[in-house]
Image (tube, rainbow, N blue to C red):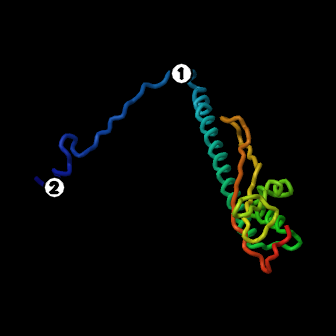
Amino acid sequence: MSEDKANRGTSTGGLAVILTPTSPPLSPRRRARQRGSQVVEVGLCLLPFLAILFLLIDLCLVIFLKATFQHAVREGVRYAMTGRTMDGLGHDASIRRVVQQYAIGFLGGEEGAQRIRIRYFVPGTLMETASNMGGNIVEISIEGFSWRPIVPLFKSGDPVNISARSTGIMEPSPGGIPPPR
């Protein structure tokens, strides 16, 4: 058998036959009845699509805020453990300023600073103390921050409360004297 005959095919002479169904033409009356159906179909598909899109955006923002706040308090603890202070500020005010800087504007101003809580604990008993001496445990937290959804389509629109907390052990201060709070 020659190569030409093998490549040609058997029944159609090498041509592929594609069968497509043909529909009868629409009558003018039927066309008039279906005229608004496309608008209705787009409306029925667009509303759930946008609802899911905004729900995903809201979910992503909440996860982003939680991660940002957790990073901010972790950096605040790292700063607090060293006992450093900024010029003209006490230890707690310096820590609040660092946490606000790492919160990228979500905890700005005096209202944001009030949401940052700084507490010190004695390591053996875990009793809260007012001292920021070396060896004590420092806990920095963000509490009371709430985020409202962008578009409350499938939810009640209640705010989502976001908090973050981190702890560390204070390093001994040079000379044994802790920085003023």
Residue 48 in the image: state x and y as whole percent.
60, 35
Q: Nearer the viewer, residue 56 or 162?
A: 162
Query: The disc labelled 1 sits on which kind of residue?
Result: Pro
Q: Where 122 sits versus 65, above or below?
A: below
Q: Return the mark for residue 28.
A: 1
Residue drawn at 66 percent across, 35 percent down: 154
Q: Where 101 sits versus 34, above or below?
A: below
Residue 31 as seen in the image, left or right of residue 63? left
Name the outermost residue toward the top. 29
Q: Where 101 sits versus 162, above or below?
A: below
Q: Nearer the viewer, residue 136 or 84?
A: 136
Residue drawn at 78 percent across, 57 percent down: 117
Q: Where 71 sits versus 63, above or below?
A: below
Asked if the residue at tag 1 contacts the one at tag 2, i.e. Cβ–Cβ closer than 8 Å, the answer is no
The residue where tag 2 is placed is: 3
Question: Which of labels 2 and 1 is toward the front?
Answer: 2
Residue 172 as seen in the image, left or right of residue 17? right
Residue 175, quarter of the rendered image = bottom right
Sequence-first tag of 2 and 1: 2
Residue 159 in the image: state x and y as whole percent.
73, 42
- In what quadrant of the picture does the C terminus appear? bottom right
Query: The disc labelled 2 sits on which kind of residue?
Result: Glu
Distance of mark 2 from mark 1, alpha carbons?
54 Å
